[in-house]
């Protein structure tokens, strides 16, 4: 039976709408640690891991997520949320691509619901999504015990095929017509979410996604 529901625009966030990534956010929080020596220790540890983060991301986005978010272990939930507004103003807002606001405005103009699906943490992107006029977002969530992060991500982990699965379930529950919907991403890791909509769009694509988009005659956008 044909789904004649509303069309939606599904966006990846980092690298697609803003020129930041998960490492930028972690580095920001690392610099906000209390105490000079704590700051030095945390920052050195974070930056020492950068090459390993890159390797695991190339190998598997799911493995990357599990490894990367261990760096938040021991962080206070209150402190992370306290600095989220500063993160938005200093890191995220200045990194919004020039074409992002226009893309979202044009999508809204034709009646599409605006949805962000991101591997970032919820408290780091809620202010950004509000600023961009996003209707709804789904993200990763840290596990906290007694107010402190364990370093674990609560399921489902938003990466790769999980994003596509979430989109299918969301579309079914909310009468969204995926055949008429758009999906936007910069990374080949988001190929599953791009493949289940009628209008996949490669935005500022990495090399592999650009190749795939060209082979399948998908639209390619540069928002920078």
Image (tube, grey):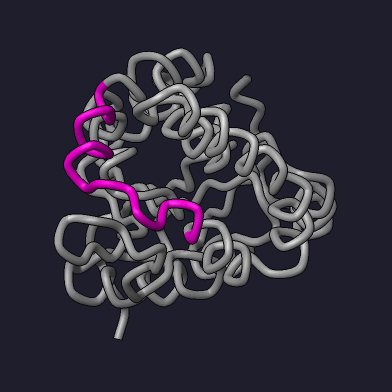
Which residue sits at x=33%, y=38%? 124
Q: 142 or 126, which is in the foreground?
A: 142
- The answer to whether 54 is drawn above or below residue 44 in the figure is below
Q: Is residue 131 visible?
A: yes
Specify start and end residues of the magenta stretch as a single range: 70-85
Task: Point out residue 32 in the picture as x, y percentages from the top left corner.
Answer: 39, 26
Task: Point out residue 179 in the picture as x, y percentages from the top left corner.
Answer: 43, 65
Which residue sits at x=39%, y=25%? 35
Residue 64 included in the magenta stretch of the image: no
In which quadrant will I find the N terminus? bottom left
- The answer to whether 168 is drawn above or below residue 118 in the figure is below
In which quadrant will I find the C terminus? top right
Q: Is residue 16 visible?
A: no
Q: 123 or 50, which is in the foreground?
A: 50
Which residue sits at x=48%, y=58%? 69
Main SS, magenta region, reads helix
Task: Point out residue 59 in the picture as x, y percentages from the top left corner.
Answer: 76, 68
């Amino acid at each position: 039976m044909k789904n004649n529901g509303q069309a939606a625009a599904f966006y990846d966030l980092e690298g697609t709408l803003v020129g930041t990534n998960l490492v930028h956010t972690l580095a920001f929080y690392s610099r906000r640690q209390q105490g000079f020596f704590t700051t030095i220790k945390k920052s050195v540890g974070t930056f020492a891991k950068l090459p390993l983060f890159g390797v695991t991301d190339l190998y598997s986005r799911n493995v990357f997520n599990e490894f990367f978010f261990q760096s938040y272990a021991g962080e206070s939930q209150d402190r992370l949320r306290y600095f989220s507004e500063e993160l938005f103003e200093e890191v995220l807002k200045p990194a919004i691509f020039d074409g992002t606001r226009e893309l979202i405005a044009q999508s809204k103009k034709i009646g599409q619901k605006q949805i962000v699906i991101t591997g970032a943490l919820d408290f780091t992107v809620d202010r950004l999504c509000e600023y961009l006029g996003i209707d709804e977002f789904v993200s990763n969530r840290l596990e906290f015990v007694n107010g402190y992060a364990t370093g674990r991500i609560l399921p489902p982990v938003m990466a790769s095929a999980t994003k596509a699965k979430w989109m299918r379930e969301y579309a079914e529950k909310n009468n969204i017509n995926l055949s008429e919907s758009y999906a936007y991403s910069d990374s080949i890791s988001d190929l599953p979410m791009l493949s289940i909509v009628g209008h996949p769009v490669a935005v500022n694509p990495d090399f592999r996604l650009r190749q795939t988009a060209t082979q399948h005659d998908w639209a390619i956008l540069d928002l920078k």
